[in-house]
């Protein structure tokens, strides 16, 4: 009889609460976590949500010292520093406020401090609020890898009123990052089946959920972006926020370490070696990297065209110049390709990947306007 391997399935956050004005109820929701907390996050995020959060906590009798800045990057030094502050103020739990890097730093700091963590996403740009992992970077913003030394959130407090006030660029990035879930998990799932491995229930759930994520984006992204531009809370916005923050996070959690990502995120990691890309958001770079992955897979022209049209409709980058890389040279492309080919996730593609293959795909992505459009470069500004 074939032996069944040990499988750990991550369950995600203890509780995901999403609604307009939900931060007004934070104190009541979080009372059971303890009498004292520390709030840490990005400066703009703390300005957007900190006062409401602190007032609610004060009203529930939870002691709150002054909020602290998380440090700007999810870097080991910032993680250790935040954990030390949490210990110094004797925090019963930690609250992370902001985008992916702030939330990942808070989750990792809570892990090291040995206390629960609550995430308060102020933008819907990634699924970081719901996952039990942290993405590590250098202090300069170069991607390092995934850390499991990270606390799964006890609560996710997702206030649509706060998220709806953020610039719509962040929601666009979230749409790009979430769309990548489908393209990456579909490639990884095909690899498992090609190798005659029977994907287990959790992996199958991740694959199906990634497809649901993309269906939600196709149905509701246009309306959600319209709402975000007008800073309104609508059903379309709620659906897309749930897909970006919650469903995409569950894809990552159900799949676990076996299939965390595929080529697109590895290519993203390679592109962060180039300082010019660090002005772009994670999901913006990932969205372009999906195009590179599709070229690597030798997808039919119609599928490439459909994906590019999806990006254009969502205002996502489809060219190097939109990532600030209009002057990229062959040495830089080679550097990106070598790094990308070596990063975790690339092994999940349904064929062997070499730096040469990645480099050719990058070159073709650079010139897709001629190869796939037969003319002038079409961008998201058109």
Image (spheres, rainbow, N blue to C red):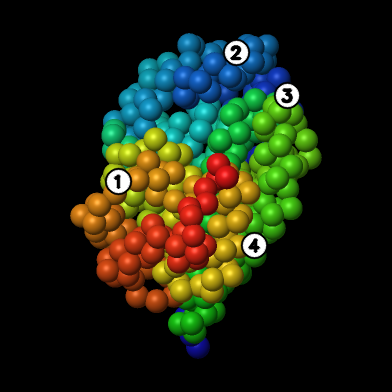
Q: Nearer the viewer, mark 1 or mark 4?
A: 1
Measured as percent of width and height from the top left, residue 315 is found at 58, 44
Spatial separation of the CA atoms under disc 3 and disc 4: 30 Å
Give SS at disc 1: loop
- Look at mark 3 in the image and give the residue it sits on: 21
Can you name the residue that lies furthest to the left here? Answer: 331
Camera-near label (3 vs 4) is 4
Inter-mark Cα distance, 4 to 2:
38 Å
Callout 4–callout 2 Cβ contact below 8 Å: no
Numbered-mark total: 4
Mark 1, other Cα within 10 Å: few <14 / some 14–19 / many ≥20: few
Q: CA distance from mark 3 to mark 2?
A: 13 Å
What residue is rendered at 48% in x and 15% in y? Answer: 67
Task: Tell which circle, 4 or 2, labels the residue nearer the N-terminal end.
Answer: 2
Marked residue nearer the N-terminal end (3 or 2): 3
The one of 264 and 305 positioned closer to us in this rendering: 305
Above-or-below relation of 350 to 113: below
Residue named by callout 1:
327
Give the Cα distance between marks 1 and 4.
36 Å
* Mark toward the viewer: 3 or 1: 1
User: Which quadrant, please, contains the C terminus?
Assistant: top right
Q: CA distance from mark 3 to mark 1?
A: 45 Å
Which residue lies under the disc numbered 4?
Answer: 211
Q: Which residue is mark 2?
A: 51
Instruction: Examine the rendered structure and indicate whether residue 118 appears above or below residue 216.
Output: above
């Amino acid at each position: 009889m074939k032996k069944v391997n040990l499988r750990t399935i991550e369950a995600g956050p203890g509780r995901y609460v999403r609604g307009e004005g939900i931060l007004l109820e934070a104190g009541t929701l979080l009372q059971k976590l303890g009498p004292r907390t520390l709030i840490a996050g990005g400066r703009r995020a703390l300005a957007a949500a900190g006062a409401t959060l602190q007032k609610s906590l004060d009203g529930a009798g939870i002691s709150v010292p002054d909020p602290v800045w998380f440090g700007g990057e999810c870097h080991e030094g910032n993680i250790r520093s935040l954990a030390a502050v949490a210990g110094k103020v004797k925090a019963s739990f930690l609250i992370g406020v902001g985008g992916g890097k702030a939330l990942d730093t808070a989750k990792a700091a809570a892990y090291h401090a040995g206390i629960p963590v609550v995430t308060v996403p102020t933008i819907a740009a990634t699924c970081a609020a719901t996952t039990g992992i942290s993405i590590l970077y250098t202090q300069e913003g170069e991607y390092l890898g995934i850390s499991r030394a990270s606390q799964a959130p006890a609560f996710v407090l997702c206030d649509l009123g706060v998220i709806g006030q953020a610039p719509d660029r962040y929601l666009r990035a979230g749409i790009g990052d979430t769309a990548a879930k489908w393209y990456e998990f579909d490639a990884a799932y095909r690899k498992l089946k090609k190798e005659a491995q029977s994907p287990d229930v959790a992996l199958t759930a991740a694959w199906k959920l990634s497809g649901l994520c993309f269906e939600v984006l196709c149905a509701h992204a246009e309306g959600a972006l319209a709402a975000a531009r007008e800073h309104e809370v609508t059903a379309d916005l709620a659906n897309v926020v749930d897909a970006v923050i919650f469903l995409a996070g569950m894809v990552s959690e159900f799949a676990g370490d076996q299939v965390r990502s595929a080529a697109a995120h590895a290519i993203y990691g390679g592109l962060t070696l180039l300082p010019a890309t660090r002005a772009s958001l994670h999901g913006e770079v990932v969205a372009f990297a999906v195009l590179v992955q599709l070229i690597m897979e030798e997808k039919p022209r119609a599928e490439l065209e459909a994906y590019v049209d999806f990006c254009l409709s969502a205002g996502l980058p489809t060219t190097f110049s939109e990532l600030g890389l209009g002057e990229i040279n062959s040495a830089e492309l080679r550097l990106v390709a070598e790094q990308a080919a070596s990063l975790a996730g690339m092994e999940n593609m349904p064929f062997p990947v070499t730096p040469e293959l990645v480099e050719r795909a990058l070159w073709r992505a650079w010139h897709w306007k001629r190869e796939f459009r037969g003319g002038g470069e079409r961008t998201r500004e058109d």
